[in-house]
Image (tube, rainbow, N blue to C red):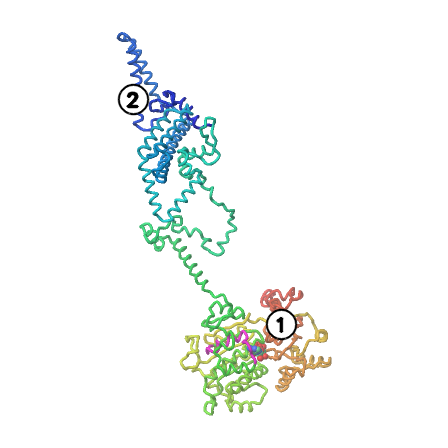
């Protein structure tokens, strides 16, 4: 639809006072238009309207009066007056417009304003281009009338008149605007053109960047559909680039889109203001397909996790002013952030938590992620030490525990002992050695609990030797005061074994060790003691004898080791142990209030007492409380747990004959490599079984408490030397006996308690090697079934048979079962 023709038709119908006076040139002569339907927009306009109505009514009265020949009659005058007053009443009535009419009128008015603006812009451009042309062409311009640009103005007027002649419906308002715009050009053109000239000059002198800005403006105008070049070149016609057509009269017809744009721009003020150039705000936004569950940022930054904390100060959405020119608002903001005094306690807590998290993150950034094996000692952090201890199942109690040994050469072990360790061939310390040796070197009391065959002997020997190195060498004068160190063991075999282990080190260091065990001539032992020995290894009974007989004094003994202390108590040696410990000098007993670390004791040496075992029943803890001062406790793995390298099997076999038969079957069928140890509970059964096995062509030695010390030592030596394949023994051989590569342990009789069982099966699977333990169970073993089941279940190599798992006696501890029976 032709927009301009609609506008004209509407004007004609809605403006009753419009008079068309089409003359030859198409011009319209009319009074300035006042729309009677529209509310006066200003007070002056309103007064003007009122005045016009009144003037028109008075004129009519005068005309009526003048057309009358004589004076008016009273009726005539009244009629005229009534006529006038009714007209006045009518004209003063408010006129209501429909919404569509108002919109149409507003559209019309806006169109007129747009036309006026367009004209003004075009005129400015024309004036400018005329001046440019004038400059370029100079005096030799082909247009003779163009010196002042008047020919262009004339041509524009001609064009305008031609257009008007083509548009007979054009109303007086258009004419008014034309005139008005001419006035505008006359008034403002020189100034605006001179301003443009000025702008142009200044833009030339400005930086290239600003000229680029001009370019970008140019580009922008292209984007919006306007072409400034066209505006300057087409005589001020507002030209749309796009699908535009003309109607039959040659008037340009606006497209729907253009009309819509004009409507949005001029009719809906709010929308036009918000939506720049009628463009939707989101038209240039990229809308991503995004799902909150795909947000991985919260994994790496917990700031996102607690997003609300960002809004703690309510400033996140506000622009922060430049700190170089801090405004009062900015200062207030920073004050609020740094000063938490005004915050609620909840917000202060949040702020503190945030701060702490940042600090943790910063500390984490400093973490060295290398494994402890890749780090030098001085770069080890607490975390590395924790990992290290976990790797070796080391757990400690007692406070001020030194770091464990990573290797032999990183320790504070004196060089001569280090050389001895190298000579013996211990490449790496075992877990108990890693932690017990540094504690021992601090001259600190210690309880060491580690599985069988884990190197506990060296754990107490090495610090003991280091301590002895600090003592004066034994000579004629101090020899009579006795040894520097004492090692107590429950059995002769164990004592002799420790002696052998100690001797390996001691002879390399020039020290003497003497074992005092039963079964040997006490006179010979007294002679050995008189010759002087730094280290005494003894069983409690014989040592007490020696002290009683004054064969031995312990005047300068300040280092005491109790190996298998629980066994000593078990065997009834507790009283003997107490007697021996009480015989030690009291002057060097460490007071309770002394700091745990005794390494720097100002030259004074307190007595150091240590206890080692694979099991630590409560009775040993009682002894420890009595004789140890602020001890450190080191546990490797789980206290009392059987060594993981042993596979434990159990079979329910009742009766001696059946068990013998089963044992022979086991030995013949599976062909276990010697040495093999078979444990029997009673001495006489040891001999019976030994003979039975010998009859079956096995090379057998036996060991029990009823044999002479010589026979016992011979049996053990034959087994170690591989002269015998099988050792049949009681619990005498159950503890501490270290025979290399025992492949099989058979519990012909089950041990009476779980600790003894643990030590027995610990004769195999030693020093990291794998072993097998087979146990025959019968009706007498009910009291250990519960603990045995637990131990087998805990063993990684073992499988608990259904018979044991479901056994009635294996369902609860024996004490509970007894209580339930009562
Ligand atoms: N660091 C080491 N490297 C290699 N072998 C070692 C090391 N320490 C000790 N051994 C060896 O391991 C074996 C067992 O050592 P030891 O007898 O001291 O163990 P244990 O824990 O006392 O056993 P039990 O509890 O049965 O008495 C011995 O033959 C010993 O020579």
Determine which quarter of the picture holds residue 815: bottom right
- Residue occupying the far right of the picture: 696
- Give the CA separation, mark 2 to mark 1: 123 Å
- Please tell me which residue is depicted at 41% across the width and 44% down the height of the picture: 216
- Circle 1: is it few (<14), some (14-19), or many (20+) Cα within 10 Å? many
- Please tell me which residue is depicted at 40% across the width and 30% down the height of the picture: 111
The magenta segment: 425-444
In the rendered image, residue 665, in percent from the top left (x then y), is placed at 72, 74
| Ligand 1 within 8 angstroms of badge 2 C-beta | no
The local secondary structure at tag 2 comes to helix
Q: Is residue 405 visible?
A: yes
Magenta region includes residue 614 = no
First along the sequence among labels 2 and 1: 2
Magenta region includes residue 428 = yes
Q: Would you place residue 443 above or below residue 548 in this image? A: above
In the rendered image, residue 775, in percent from the top left (x then y), is placed at 66, 72
Q: Left or right: 172 with respect to 712? A: left
Near-viewer residue (305 or 192) = 192
Near-viewer residue (427 or 45) = 45
- Residue occupying the far left of the picture: 71
Determine which quarter of the picture holds residue 153: top left
Q: Left or right: 458 with respect to 191? A: right
In the rendered image, residue 250, in percent from the top left (x then y), is placed at 45, 28
Q: Find ligand 1 in the image and state its quadrant.
A: bottom right
Question: For residue 51, which numbered disc appears in the image?
Answer: 2
Q: Is residue 822 visible?
A: no
Considering the image in quadrants, where does the C terminus appear?
bottom right
Near-viewer residue (290 or 398) = 290
In the rendered image, residue 586, in percent from the top left (x then y), is placed at 44, 82
Question: For residue 646, which numbered disc appears in the image?
Answer: 1
- Residue occupying the far front of the picture: 140
């Amino acid at each position: 639809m032709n927009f301009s023709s609609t506008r004209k038709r509407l004007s004609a119908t809605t403006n009753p006072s419009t008079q068309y006076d089409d003359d030859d040139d198409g011009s319209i002569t009319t009074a300035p238009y006042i729309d009677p339907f529209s509310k006066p927009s200003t007070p002056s306009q309103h007064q003007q309207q009122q005045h016009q109505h009144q003037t028109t009514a008075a004129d009519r009265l005068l005309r009526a009066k003048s057309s009358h020949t004589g004076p008016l009659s009273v009726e005539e005058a009244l009629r005229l007056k009534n006529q006038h007053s009714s007209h006045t009443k009518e004209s003063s009535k408010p006129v209501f417009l429909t919404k569509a009419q108002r919109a149409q009128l507003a559209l019309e008015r806006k169109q007129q304003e747009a036309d006026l603006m367009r004209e003004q812009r075009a005129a400015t451009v024309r004036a400018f281009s005329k001046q440019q042309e004038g400059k370029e062409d100079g005096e030799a311009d082909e247009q003779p009338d163009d010196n002042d640009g008047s020919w262009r103005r004339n041509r524009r007027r001609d064009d305008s008149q031609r257009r008007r002649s083509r548009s007979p419906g054009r109303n007086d308002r258009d004419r008014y605007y034309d005139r008005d715009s001419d006035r505008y050009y006359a008034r403002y053109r020189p100034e605006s053109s001179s301003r443009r000239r000025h702008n142009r000059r200044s833009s030339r002198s400005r930086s290239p960047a600003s000229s680029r800005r001009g370019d970008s403006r140019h580009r922008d105008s292209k984007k919006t559909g306007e072409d400034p070049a066209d505006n300057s070149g087409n005589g001020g016609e507002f030209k749309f680039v796009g699908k535009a057509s003309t109607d039959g009269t040659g008037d340009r017809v606006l497209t729907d889109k253009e009309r819509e744009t004009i409507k949005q721009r001029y009719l809906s003020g709010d929308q036009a203001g918000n939506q720049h150039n009628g463009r939707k705000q989101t038209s240039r936004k990229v809308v991503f397909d995004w799902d909150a569950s795909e947000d991985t940022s919260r994994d790496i930054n917990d700031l996102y996790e607690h997003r609300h904390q960002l809004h703690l100060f309510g400033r996140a959405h506000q622009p922060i002013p430049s700190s170089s020119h801090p405004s009062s608002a900015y200062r207030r903001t920073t004050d609020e952030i740094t000063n938490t005094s005004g915050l609620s306690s909840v917000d202060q807590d949040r702020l503190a938590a945030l701060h702490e998290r940042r600090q943790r993150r910063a500390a984490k950034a400093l973490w060295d992620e290398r494994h402890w094996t890749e780090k030098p000692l001085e770069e080890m952090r607490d975390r590395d030490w924790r990992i290290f201890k976990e790797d070796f199942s080391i757990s400690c109690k007692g406070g001020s525990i030194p770091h464990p040994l990573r290797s032999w050469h990183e320790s504070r072990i004196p060089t001569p002992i280090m050389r001895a360790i190298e000579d013996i061939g211990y490449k790496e310390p075992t877990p108990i050695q890693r932690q017990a040796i540094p504690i021992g070197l601090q001259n600190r009391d210690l309880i060491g609990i580690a599985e069988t065959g884990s190197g506990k002997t060296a754990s107490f020997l090495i610090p003991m030797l280091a301590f002895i190195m600090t003592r004066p060498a034994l000579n004629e004068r101090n020899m009579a005061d006795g040894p520097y160190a004492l090692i107590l063991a429950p059995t002769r075999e164990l004592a002799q074994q420790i002696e052998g282990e100690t001797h390996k080190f001691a002879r390399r260091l020039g020290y003497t060790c003497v074992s005092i065990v039963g079964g040997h001539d006490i006179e010979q032992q007294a002679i050995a003691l008189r010759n002087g020995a730094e280290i005494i290894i003894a069983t409690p009974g014989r040592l007490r004898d020696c002290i009683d007989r004054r064969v031995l004094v312990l005047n300068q003994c300040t280092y005491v080791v109790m190996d298998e202390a629980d066994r000593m108590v078990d065997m009834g040696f507790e009283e003997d142990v107490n007697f021996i410990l009480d015989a030690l000098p009291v002057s060097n007993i460490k007071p309770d209030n002394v700091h745990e670390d005794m390494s720097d004791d100002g030259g004074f040496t307190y007595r150091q007492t240590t206890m080692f075992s694979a099991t630590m029943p409560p009775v040993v803890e009682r002894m420890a409380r009595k004789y140890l001062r602020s001890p450190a406790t080191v546990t490797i793995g789980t206290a009392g747990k059987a060594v993981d390298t042993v596979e434990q099997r159990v079979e329910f076999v009742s009766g001696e004959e059946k068990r013998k038969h089963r044992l022979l079957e086991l030995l013949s069928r599976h062909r276990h490599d010697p040495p093999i140890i078979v444990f029997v509970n009673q001495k006489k059964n040891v001999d019976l079984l030994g003979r039975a096995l010998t009859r079956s062509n096995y090379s057998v030695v036996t060991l029990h408490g009823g044999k002479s010390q010589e026979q016992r030592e011979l049996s053990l030596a034959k087994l170690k030397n591989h002269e015998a394949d099988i050792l049949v023994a009681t619990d005498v051989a159950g503890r501490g006996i270290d025979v290399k590569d025992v492949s099989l342990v058979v519990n012909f009789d089950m041990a009476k308690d779980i600790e003894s069982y643990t030590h027995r099966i610990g004769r195999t699977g030693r020093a990291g090697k794998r072993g097998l333990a087979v146990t025959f169970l019968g009706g007498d073993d009910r009291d250990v079934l519960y603990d045995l089941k637990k131990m087998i279940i805990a063993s990684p190599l073992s499988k608990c048979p259904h018979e044991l798992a479901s056994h009635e006696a294996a369902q609860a501890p024996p004490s509970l079962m007894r209580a339930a029976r009562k």
